[in-house]
Image (cartoon, helix red, strand yellow):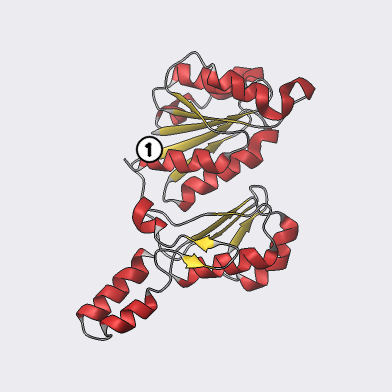
């Protein structure tokens, strides 16, 4: 949207279009009414990043219309929680998008996002946590951050984590994804100085209560510097990490 608006302003300045013609181009600003959705085109100016589509619960037709509205204004596109079945129904309408099955995300990048100041390191406690970790990692990359992935380094074998000590120490922000008892963020926060964004997952046996036990454990973390997002919210962790890394 920023590029789109800049082009309109430049054309008015160069007298290539009249102010009235410019207003016609801006009729969908600050948001575009689609009856079932209001596409927030002004978000990129207000927040520095375009609106992201939460795919779960939307019909293929709704997703296509919202995605096209975003792309037509020159913004980058990210759809999260997009199942493989729904992707198959919409992919022909969005030919420029790349689908990441494990993370259930679709990305279409038109313009390069501003680069972050340092690296974001995403850690998962187990292999079962990788889908949420990948959502976080891809979100970070979408918003212009360099990302390192270090997976399956949970507390069941801490030597696996310590083997990556030097690499983790270089991070500006750490995203730590864990299910079961959710202990890994506390361990990481006690070892490294970078802020830790903890992501509880719904991975675990019955008493984990679909991620609730991991969420509560992370909220009760002993070391300082731990922030916690909602259960399975890889996008929220990636977005917050990007904000910190761009400060």
Residue 203's place in the image compared with 92, above or below, is above
Seen as rendered, the residue at the extreme front is 35
Residue 154's place in the image compared with 3, above or below, is above
Which residue is drawn at the image coordinates 60% and 71% (left, top)?
95
Residue 14's place in the image compared with 83, above or below, is below
Q: Quadrant of the N terminus?
A: bottom left
Position of residue 216 measured from the top left corner of the image (x, y, whole percent): 60, 20
Instruction: Choose between 147 and 216: the one closer to the eye.
Output: 216
Which residue is drawn at the image coordinates 21% and 82% (left, top)?
14
Side (left or right) of 15 relative to 3:
left
Instruction: Choose between 238 and 22: the one closer to the eye.
Output: 22
Instruction: Choose between 227 and 185: the one closer to the eye.
Output: 227
Position of residue 163 measured from the top left corner of the image (x, y, whole percent): 53, 24
Q: Is residue 183 at least partly visible in the picture? A: no
Read off the residue under disc 1: 244
Position of residue 46 measured from the top left corner of the image (x, y, whole percent): 35, 54
Q: Quadrant of the C terminus?
A: top left
Residue 240's place in the image compared with 216, above or below, is below
Position of residue 184 measured from the top left corner of the image (x, y, whole percent): 57, 22
Task: Bin the neighbour count of mark 1 within 10 Å (Cα to Cα): few under 14, some 14-19, many 20 and up.
Answer: some
Q: Secondary structure at mark 1?
A: helix
Instruction: Choose between 174 and 6: the one closer to the eye.
Output: 6
């Amino acid at each position: 949207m920023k590029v789109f608006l800049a082009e309109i302003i430049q054309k008015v300045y160069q007298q290539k279009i009249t102010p009235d013609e410019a207003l016609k181009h801006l009729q969908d600003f600050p948001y575009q009414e689609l009856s079932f959705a209001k596409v927030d085109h002004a978000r990129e100016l207000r927040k520095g990043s375009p609106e992201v589509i939460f795919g779960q619960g939307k019909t293929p037709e709704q997703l296509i219309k919202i995605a096209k509205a975003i792309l037509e204004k020159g913004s980058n596109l990210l759809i999260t929680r997009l199942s493989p079945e729904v992707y198959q129904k919409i992919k022909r309408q969005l030919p420029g998008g790349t689908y990441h099955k494990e993370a259930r995300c679709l990305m279409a990048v038109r313009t390069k996002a501003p680069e972050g100041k340092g690296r974001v390191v995403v850690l998962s406690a187990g292999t079962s946590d990788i889908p949420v970790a990948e959502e976080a990692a891809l979100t970070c990359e979408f918003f212009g951050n360099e990302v390192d992935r270090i997976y399956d380094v949970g507390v069941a074998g801490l030597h696996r984590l310590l083997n990556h000590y030097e690499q983790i120490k270089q991070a500006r922000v750490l995203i730590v994804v864990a299910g079961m008892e959710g202990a890994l963020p506390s361990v990481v926060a006690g070892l490294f100085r970078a802020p830790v964004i903890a992501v509880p997952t719904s991975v675990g046996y019955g008493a984990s209560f679909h991620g609730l036990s991991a969420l509560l454990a992370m909220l009760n973390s002993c070391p300082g510097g731990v922030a916690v997002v909602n259960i399975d919210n890889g996008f929220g962790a990636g977005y917050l990490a990007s904000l910190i890394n761009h400060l």
